[in-house]
Amino acid sequence: MSTAPQLVVHRDKELMAQAAAARLITKIVDAQASRGSASVVLTGGRNGNGLLAALAAAPARDAIDWARLDLWWGDERFLPEGDPERNITQAREALLDAVPLDPKRVHAMPASDGPHGTDVDAAAAAYAEELAAAADPTNHGPVPTFDVLMLGVGPDTHVASLFPELPAVRETERTVVGVHGAPKPPPTRVTLTLPAIRAAREVWLLAAGEDKAEAAEIALSGAGEIQSPAAGAYGRTRTLWLLDKAAASQLPRELYPAASA
């Protein structure tokens, strides 16, 4: 069952990144206090990386027990290990190399020079198996119940590598699929599907900048998920849209309270 989206609008993208980082620290610390560990799905792109950089700079980051944190990815560009365009490469630079994570709990999606070679569908199936192995009987299906799953919203309303009208956004069974012919380079990618995304306790959608305003308006106006994948991304207990004023500029004012200063 979908949860109605909540909106938080910030003055600019820098403030949005800092506030989202503070919110994420609190969520991770709370999950570790109540369950012993936390599980977060990261997103790439400018907003995802901006949040990670803000987290790296936040004094409160040391409140997190980094050794008891599982990190997953919502999607990945199917490129060689270490390629600067890969989400994990960018995440390492922004944050991961600066904090004492347990390497076994950093679940990178396979690279195109990994054990599956250039077979993106085999790589996707392997990641689905890794997710299933981390799930337990209290979880909702073959993925862990992520505490927070973050998604950047593209100008075309895509989230992860689920693009409007393409086969991946129509997937209802598998949790991870290979993407062929993505409209945004590189064309070959690995992505979580909507069923995997909806297993998360909380889904946070990040949108900043004028180029995201139309996408936010479409996704929040009742569009269907095949045409607007962002509209189909929601969490079990909470769906949170984190925007800056520019990205919220086309939304009806009654949808959100005054922007934070």
Image (cartoon, rainbow, N blue to C red):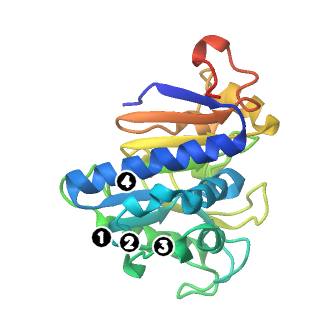
Q: Is residue 109 left or right of residue 131?
A: right
- Dot 3: within a 10 Å radius of its alpha carbon, few (fewer than 14), some, or many (20 or more) residues? some
| Disc 4 from disc 3: Cα separation | 14 Å
Question: Sequence order check: which comes first, mark 2 or mark 4?
Answer: 4
Q: Is residue 76 visible?
A: yes
Disc 4 residue type?
Ile
Disc 2 residue type?
Glu
Q: Residue at x 38, y 61 (%)?
A: 64
Does dot 4 land on a helix, a strand or a loop? helix
Q: Residue at x 24, y 54 (%)?
A: 33
- Which residue is labeled 2 in the image? 130
- Which residue is labeled 4 in the image? 28
- Which residue is labeled 1 in the image? 133
User: Is 144 situated above or below 222?
Assistant: below
Q: Is residue 194 visible?
A: no
Q: Is residue 8 left or right of residue 34?
A: right
Residue 99: mark: 3
Does dot 2 land on a helix, a strand or a loop? helix
Residue in the foreground of this view, choosing between 114 and 243: 243
Image position, residue 228 (x, y; %): 65, 35
Q: Residue at x 30, y 70 (%)?
A: 133
Disc 3 residue type?
Val
Does dot 1 land on a helix, a strand or a loop? helix
Image position, residue 237 (x, y; %): 35, 35
